[in-house]
């Protein structure tokens, strides 16, 4: 039986990912933690148990008492030795005094010790030094990843046919490629779709002035040709609620998600992705809901993409701070986030995004969306997995 041991901290993703690699033997995982980390342990165990990996919690004191800590760790090591366990110590996580104490104890027993390097996501051997580094397989999924950080998620069921999805992607690319010219027309279409939502119906009348908008007429014609809407006698009628939402700004989210799907064919480090992920977190007694427009996992790192079709004049700072906060809360230290904006951004917003470590794709870059997204996702590091293990 192969037993891995690791220390729980605030960002324990790298304790889980090597266990899911089919080329790394793992039958059991012992999580070292303090009493206050028991809830974290239970979330981690809930990911491993369905995959037939036993999980155990080994309690250590919360106080900074190195002598007491070493006594506990020696007791764990003696017990593992007594039961003739094959033990690997994962030194990727843990507060420094706990990590150094554990390293010292496990090194005394000459057990293999490794770390998962954060950027490359490679398994690097601290002992023995002659073992070859290897890429960890990208097998964790969005729901598991979010569970690690105390969130539950609901992924939408896909009801759109592949044929319609391709049509919507083509339509989105056309609109994005003419973002600067079509901006006012799309703002009006967004307003009309919002009016339908507020009045809880699928048809809306255009004013005489709106009927004369050339760009709006082009957009309505696109919707008609795709079968998403009809237009007669100044009345725009959406075929269904999904079509209304598409015109209400979801076209950009759909475009970004479809582009991520297309990039996955050439970038194998993309392991999971979803559109409109509903995320629920417990804060005290209440549950807080957030929506991630597009979420994807790349090289075992969470990537969040916020899509904005409206201007950010009034809520620019709020949008950016919220995106930064969700990235840190849901994804840990290695998570990344991006804002894709259809409307031009102010210099202030660009500077603020840079300060917060957020990537930006603006309207003048939307025509090359696939190239910009590909470069950003590739920046998560990693490479196709090498199944050879030393």
Image: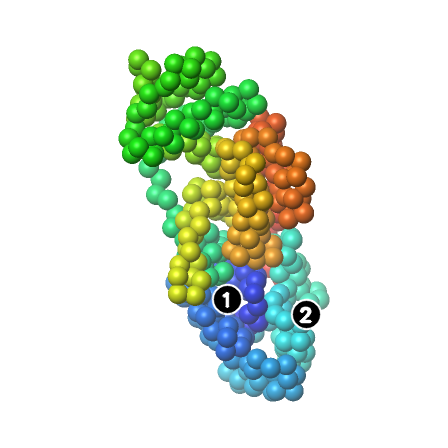
User: Could you say where residue 281 lies in the image, as x and y percent from the top left?
Assistant: 44, 58
Q: Which residue is mark 1?
A: 26
The crowd level at tag 1 (other Cα within 10 Å; few <14, some 14-19, many 20+) is: many
Query: Is 132 positioned to the left or the right of 213 in the image?
Result: right
User: Could you say where residue 284 lies in the image, as x and y percent from the top left?
Assistant: 43, 65
CB atoms of marks 1 and 2 within 8 Å: no
Residue in the foreground of this view, choosing between 181 and 159: 181
Q: Is any part of residue 242 visible from this angle?
A: no
Q: Give the Cα separation between the discs numbered 1 and 2.
A: 18 Å
Colouring:
rainbow
Query: Is 353 positioned to the left or the right of 276 in the image?
Result: right
Q: Which residue is mark 2?
A: 127
User: Could you say where residue 309 lies in the image, as x and y percent from the top left?
Assistant: 50, 33
SS assignment at label 1: loop
Query: Is 136 positioned to the left or the right of 190 in the image?
Result: right
**Residue placed furthest toward the left:** 201
- What residue appears at the point 70 percent right and 65 percent down from the top-left corner? 130
Count of numbered tags = 2
């Amino acid at each position: 039986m192969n037993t891995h041991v690791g220390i729980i901290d605030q960002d324990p993703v790298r304790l889980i990912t090597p266990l899911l690699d089919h080329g790394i033997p793992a039958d059991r995982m012992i999580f070292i933690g303090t009493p206050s980390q028991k809830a974290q342990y239970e979330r981690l165990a809930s990911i491993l148990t369905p995959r037939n990996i036993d999980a155990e919690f080994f309690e250590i004191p919360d106080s900074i008492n190195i002598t007491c800590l070493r006594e506990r760790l020696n007791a764990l090591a003696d017990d593992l030795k007594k039961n003739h366990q094959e033990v690997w110590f994962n030194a990727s996580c843990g507060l420094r005094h706990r990590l150094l104490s554990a390293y010292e104890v496990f090194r005394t027993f000459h057990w293999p010790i490794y770390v998962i390097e954060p950027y490359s996501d490679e398994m690097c051997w601290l002992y023995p030094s002659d073992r070859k580094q290897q890429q960890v397989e990208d097998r964790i999924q969005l729901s598991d990843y979010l569970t690690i950080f105390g969130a539950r998620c609901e992924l939408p069921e896909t009801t759109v046919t592949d044929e319609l999805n391709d049509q919507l992607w083509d339509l989105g690319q056309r609109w994005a490629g003419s973002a600067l010219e079509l901006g006012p027309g799309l703002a009006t279409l967004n307003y009309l779709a919002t009016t339908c939502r507020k009045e809880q119906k699928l048809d809306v009348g255009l004013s005489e002035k709106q009927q004369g908008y050339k760009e709006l007429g082009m957009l309505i014609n696109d919707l008609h040709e795709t079968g998403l809407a009809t237009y007669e006698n100044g009345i725009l009628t959406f075929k269904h609620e999904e079509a209304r939402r598409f015109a209400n700004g979801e076209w950009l989210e759909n475009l970004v998600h479809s582009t991520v799907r297309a990039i996955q064919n050439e970038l194998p480090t993309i392991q999971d992705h979803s559109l409109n992920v509903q995320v629920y977190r417990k804060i005290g007694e209440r549950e807080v809901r957030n929506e991630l427009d597009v979420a994807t996992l790349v090289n075992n790192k969470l990537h969040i993409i916020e899509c904005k079709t409206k201007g950010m004049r009034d809520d620019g700072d709020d949008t950016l701070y919220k995106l930064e906060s969700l990235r840190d809360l849901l994804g840990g230290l290695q998570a990344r986030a991006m804002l894709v904006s259809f409307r031009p951004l102010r210099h202030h917003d660009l500077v603020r995004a840079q300060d917060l470590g957020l990537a930006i794709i603006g309207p003048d870059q939307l025509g090359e969306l696939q190239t910009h997204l590909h470069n950003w996702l590739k920046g998560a590091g990693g490479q196709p997995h090498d199944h050879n293990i030393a």
